[in-house]
Image: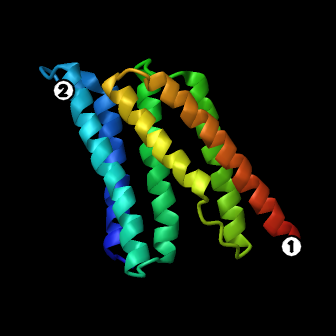
Amino acid sequence: MFNIPNILAIVRLLLAPVMFLLLVNRNIFDGIHYSWLDYFATFIFVLASATDFFDGYIARTFNQITTLGKIIDPLADKMLTLAGFLGLMILDRASPWAIYLILTRELFITGLRVSAVSQGMDMAASFAGKVKTVVQMVAIGFLLMEWPFANIILWLAVAITIYSGYEYTRDFFKKTSRV
């Protein structure tokens, strides 16, 4: 149960609130310039994002896929993106509408996943879902660093997020109509 992929997912779960703290509770870091808090938050985000890649790679390569991993990995992903997007929205670096659309899709699809699991269905992430995660993470990174085109990448992430949600919903209902 506690294999390397699951430990990496747990590390990601623990890093998400640390990143959020750096973004939204800047007053407790007296004497540290905000730009350094952005750098620390970005470092934590990149480190946590890397654990997402490695936990999946190790789990598939070494056949270490577990039920716990199937639950904790997407939860860790959601917590990380939630921490990033909400922190950026609080800092007024991300559109509240973009964040609302992304988080609404994430909550809806999480509900469908729970329903699928309760019916014994396997609803693995699609290619569009994986692209969605990567583009969301790139958007968060760009927004954290306030790099050019950050908002364009954010809205691209919104479009891909909605599309992958459509795909997931369509596939869910196709599978449930066969049950």
Q: Is 154 above or below relative to 161?
A: above
Residue 155 percent location from the top left of the image: 56, 28
What residue appears at the point 63 percent right and 46 percent down from the top-left corner?
A: 107
Circle 1 sits on which residue? 178
- Describe the element under mark 1 as helix, strand or loop: helix
Q: Is 47 above or below relative to 88?
A: below
Residue 56 percent location from the top left of the image: 42, 66
Q: How is the structure coloured here? A: rainbow
**Front-most of 99 and 171?**
171
Circle 2 sits on which residue? 36
Disc 2 to disc 1, how far (Cα)? 54 Å
**Front-most of 161 and 101?**
161
Q: Amino acid at mark 1?
A: Arg
Query: Is residue 2 shown left or right of residue 151?
Result: left
Residue 16 in view here: yes
Q: Earlier in the sequence, mark 2 or mark 1?
A: 2
